[in-house]
């Protein structure tokens, strides 16, 4: 498994290329949650499936995608929709887009009596959406082999998630549920891009 330093260095190279105009499509960088995501991956096995949103460089690296393959996909403009089926990892640029697919796969694995599990990463604002509540409820009620990892950086794009919902505590913030992993982190980069050039 890659270590914290390797993760940071990989994304620094991506950030530098983006700021210098060498990557012409959006990138969403992770720096700030290395310790917590590495800890989450201690419970993710080679035959498990991982689903993510548009911010998935770290998950790909930790799932075993070779750096050169990941780098090539990002340079080609696919940073926000990285999919490597051979490594059992998929991401979607649509907010909540991976949730029903991850839930459906978990149902399929259960019916096949597979030993594999699904790990679905979502942000704090996506976790407040209707599709997240439906997928989590269905998975819990049917005891599906899935975990939902909610990564709370306090943002929905550039909006404060708690302010947007008029609350000081989000739905899953204090949940004691083996199906939910919830952690907060402070994102070092902007929501998108690397902070030194306009991207759209």
Image (cartoon, helix red, strand yellow):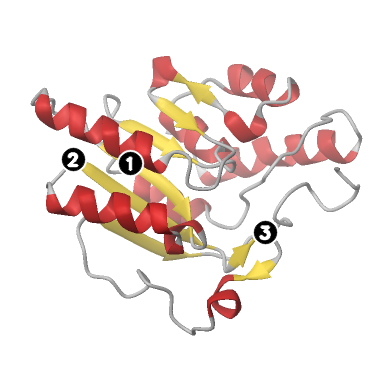
Q: Quadrant of residue 161?
A: bottom right
180, above or below 119, in the image: below
Quickly name the residue at label 2.
145
- Helix, strand or loop for disc 3: loop
In the foreground, 147 or 12: 147
Q: Earlier in the sequence, mark 1 or mark 3?
A: 1
Residue 72 at x, y = what percent? Answer: 68, 18
Residue 128 at x, y = what percent? Answer: 44, 64
Which of the labelled discs sits on residue 51, or is there none? none
Q: Is residue 66 left or right of residue 31?
A: left
Q: Distance between the residues labelled 2 and 1?
A: 9 Å
For marks 1 and 3, give the one nearer the viewer.
3
Residue 160 at x, y = what percent? Answer: 63, 73
Q: In which quarter of the image is residue 102?
A: top left
Q: How far apart are marks 2 and 3 (CA)?
A: 30 Å
Residue 89 at x, y = what percent? Answer: 43, 28
Quickly name the residue at label 3.
157
- If the image is split into quadrants, where does the N terminus sit? top left
Q: Is residue 82 left or right of residue 176?
A: right
- Helix, strand or loop for disc 2: loop
In this rendering, the count of numbered labels is 3
Which of the labelled discs sits on residue 119, or is there none? 1
61, above or below 142, in the image: above
Q: How far apart are marks 1 and 3 (CA)?
A: 23 Å
Residue in the picture at 49% in, 62% down: 124
- Helix, strand or loop for disc 1: strand
Mark 1, other Cα within 10 Å: few <14 / some 14–19 / many ≥20:
many
172, above or below 192, in the image: below
Mark 3, other Cα within 10 Å: few <14 / some 14–19 / many ≥20:
few
Q: Are marks 2 and 3 in contact (CB under 8 Å)?
A: no
In the foreground, 63 or 84: 84
**Outermost residue toward the left?**
113
């Amino acid at each position: 498994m890659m270590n914290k330093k390797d993760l940071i260095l990989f994304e620094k190279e991506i950030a530098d290329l983006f700021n210098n105009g060498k990557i012409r499509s959006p990138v969403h960088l992770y720096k700030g949650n290395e310790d917590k995501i590495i800890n989450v991956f201690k419970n993710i096995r080679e035959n498990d499936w991982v689903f993510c949103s548009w911010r998935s460089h770290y998950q790909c690296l930790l799932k075993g995608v070779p750096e050169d393959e990941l780098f090539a996909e990002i340079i080609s403009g696919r940073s926000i929709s990285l999919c490597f089926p051979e490594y059992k990892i998929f991401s979607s640029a649509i907010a909540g887009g991976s949730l029903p697919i991850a839930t459906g796969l978990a149902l399929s694995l259960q019916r096949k009596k597979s030993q594999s599990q699904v790990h679905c990463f979502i942000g704090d604002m996506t976790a407040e959406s209707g599709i997240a509540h439906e997928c989590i409820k269905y998975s819990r009620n049917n005891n599906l082999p899935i975990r939902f990892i909610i990564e709370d950086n306090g943002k929905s794009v550039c909006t404060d998630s708690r302010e947007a919902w008029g609350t000081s505590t989000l739905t899953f913030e204090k949940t004691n549920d083996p199906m939910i992993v919830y952690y907060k982190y402070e994102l070092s980069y902007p929501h998108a891009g690397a902070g030194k050039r306009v991207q759209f």
